[in-house]
Image (tube, rainbow, N blue to C red):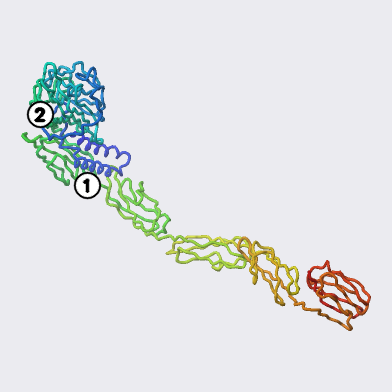
Amino acid sequence: MGGLFSFTILLNSRITKTLSKFDKLNIRAMKKAAYFLFLFLLSHGFIKAQCVQYCSGYTVAPITYSAFPFTGNTVTSSFSPNNDDGYTAPVPIGFNFDFYCNTYSTVLICSNGFIVFGSTAPSINGSDPAQAFPSSASPNDIVALNMNDFDPGTGGSITYTTIGTSPNQMFVVSYSDVPIWYNPATNTPSVPVYNTGQIVLYETSNYIEIHTASVGTSPYVGTQGIENAAGNSGKVVPGRSATTWSSGPSAYQFPKLMVGLPPTGITGPTVACAGDPLLFSANTSTTVSNCVWTLPPGWTGTSTTSVLNANAGSSGTIAVTANYTGCPSSTPAIIVVTVNPIPGIVVGNVFPPTVCSGNTFAVNVSGAATYTVDPGSITGTSPFTLTGVIGTQYSVTGTSAAGCINQTAVPIPITVNQTPTVTINSGSICLGKGFQLTPAGASSYSYSTPFTLVTPTAAGIVTVMVIGTTINCSDTAFSTIVTHPLPTTAAGISKTLICLKETATLTANGASSYSWQGITSTASLIVVSPTIASTYNYSVTGTNSFGCSSSATVNLTVDPCFGIGEMTEGRTLISSIYPNPASMLLNLVLTSDASVSLYDMNGKVVYTAILENGNHVINADQLDPGVYMLIARNGNITSRMRIIKHE
C-alpha cells in the first residue's frame, strides 16, 4: 500500500512536468485531480499508513465460526487414483489468489482433508501420519482443514464453489460428514469418526479462513493449517499440528503479515506556482507516531502526519522529521521546491467598445506569455478577435512562460447589444387582392416598397425586403408574395325565352369548380325549369386551382304562354291556327296570300313558305318542344302569333 501512496504523489509531480511542455494551461487542473484522487483513495482505505503486505509471512488468529452453504460442485467420487487417497483434477478458483508470493487460479482437492495449489498432483498423498507444518516432505503448497486419513468412499460429501461478486468473491471447499478411514474387521477405530468443515479463500485480501463445524476424536494424528510450496514456512492452529485433536464449531483466519517501510524521503512536486495547493508525503513506516514539517517563507499549511497539504509561497526547502513508536526521531528528509510567480494581466484597448451580437471586436492584453479568454476557453496570444454574444461577460487569464496561471480572471470591458432577428410573413393572393406585410423581431422597420399593403397589378412573384432595427442593430428579412391569376369564368344558356314548364340548360366553363347563386349546385351544366313567369338572372362563380374566383351571368325570360298572342299591322292575315298548343300537325287559316315563317326562341327560322289564302297544314312533329313565333307578311301587312309545341 505504501508503494501506491508514493506512486500517487510521484504521478502528481510527473504529470506537472510532462504536461507543461504541451499544455501549460492544464497544469493546475491536473495537480488538483491527482490531489483529490489521493484523498479519495485515502478516505476509502486503499492507502493505509505506509503499510505493505509481507507476501511470505502469515499470522493465525481465531475468528467467529460461520458456515457457508455446503453446496456447489460435488467431487466426492472424482479422486484419482481412488477415493480413499486421491486428488481431483485442477478445479478453478474463480479468481487469482496470492499464496506465499505465488499467484494461482486452480487448486487440487485431496480426499484427505486439504487442498493443494496449482495443477500438478503431489506424488505422495500424505494421509497418515499427518505432517507437522512446515515440512519439506510432499505434499506442500497446501491449506488443510484436517490433514488426515479421510475415506469419502464410505460416506459424506466434498464440494467446491465460488460465491460473491468480484472483487469480493470467495472460493469455498466443503467437507461434510466425511469419515476417517477404519477397518470394521479389526474395529480400528471401533466406530466411524466424521469431519465437517470448510476452507475459504478470499479474493483481493488473499485471506485464508478455516471453519471447523465438527472433528471427532480419532486415533490418527491430523494437522490444521497452511504451508508454502518449498515446505519451509507454514502456520498451524495451536494444538492441531500432527496430533490427535477434536473440535466443535471453531474458525481461524490466516491474514498476511504487515510490515512498515523505513523513511526514505519526501515525495511531492519540485516545481510549482505561487499559491498552488500541493501535496507532499513522507515515506515512513507503520509505527510512526507523528511528523514535524518545516516550510519555506510564505507557505501555508500544517500537518502532524506523513501527509502534508500546503499552498506554495517562495522557493525553498521543505523538511520533515518522523517519530516512531519505540524509536528515536528520524533525521529530516528534505525536498527542494522552486516556486514561480503568477503573471499579472492587463487588458488594453477594446475596439469597438460597443458591438451588435454576432459581430466581432478586438482586444489587446499583456502581462503573460499566453492567454485564455472565456467563455469558450479560447487560447492564444494577444490581440484576440472575439464574437459578441448578448449577456456574456468576457474575461481573460494568463499563463507565464513557466506555466503558472493567474487564476483571477480579468474582465474585458465590452458592451454587446442584441442584434434583432427579423421575420416577415410571406404568402399568396389572388390578382386584385392586397397582401399585408407583418414584420416582427425589431423595434422599427423600413421596406423596399412604399406601402405595407402590397397590391400587385399582374400575376407573378413579388419580393419585398424589410430591415428591422433595435438599438442601432439591424437585421434583414424578405417576404415573397405570389399573385395567382383569376379564372376566365364564362356562362351560357341554351334558350333565353321559354314558356312555363319548359327547361333551359345553363353551362359554365373557364374554371376548376363552380358555385351557382340562387341554385344549390356546383355542376358546370345544370337544367332549370322556373315555375313562375319572370325574367331570371343566373350568376355562377368559378374558382381555379389557386383558389381565385370570378363570376359570369346569363338571363332567362319565362313566358306563361297561356294562349295565342298576336301582333298585327293593318288587317289580320291569320284567321286562325289550331291546335295551339300543338304536338304534331298545325292547321293554319290565312285570310289572304302571305309569306309565312316560323321562328324559335333564339330567332332561328325553322319553317318558311309562301301560301295562298285558305287552309294549310304545317308538320310540327320535327320541332323541339318550346315556344315559336309564326309571322305572316303581305306587303306592308304583318301578322304575328305565338305557338306552343308540346312533346
Considering the numbered disc 1 on the image, is that residue within a helix, a strand or a loop?
loop
Give the image quarter of residue 239. Answer: top left
Viewer-side label of 1, 2: 2
Give the image quarter of residue 61. Answer: top left
> Please, is residue 241 above or below residue 10 in the view?
above
Q: Give coordinates of residue 112: x percent, y percent.
A: 17, 22
Amino acid carrying label 1: it is Gly
Residue placed under numbered mark 2 in the picture: 247
> Please, is residue 302 above or below residue 600 in the view?
above
Residue placed under numbered mark 1 in the picture: 275
Mark 1 → mark 2, Cα distance in angstroms: 65 Å
Q: Are marks 1 and 2 in contact (CB under 8 Å)?
A: no
One can see residue 257 in this view = no
Residue positioned 71% across, 76% down in the render: 535
Q: Give coordinates of residue 351: x percent, y percent.
A: 39, 56
Dot placed on the residue nearer the N-terminal end, 1 or 2: 2
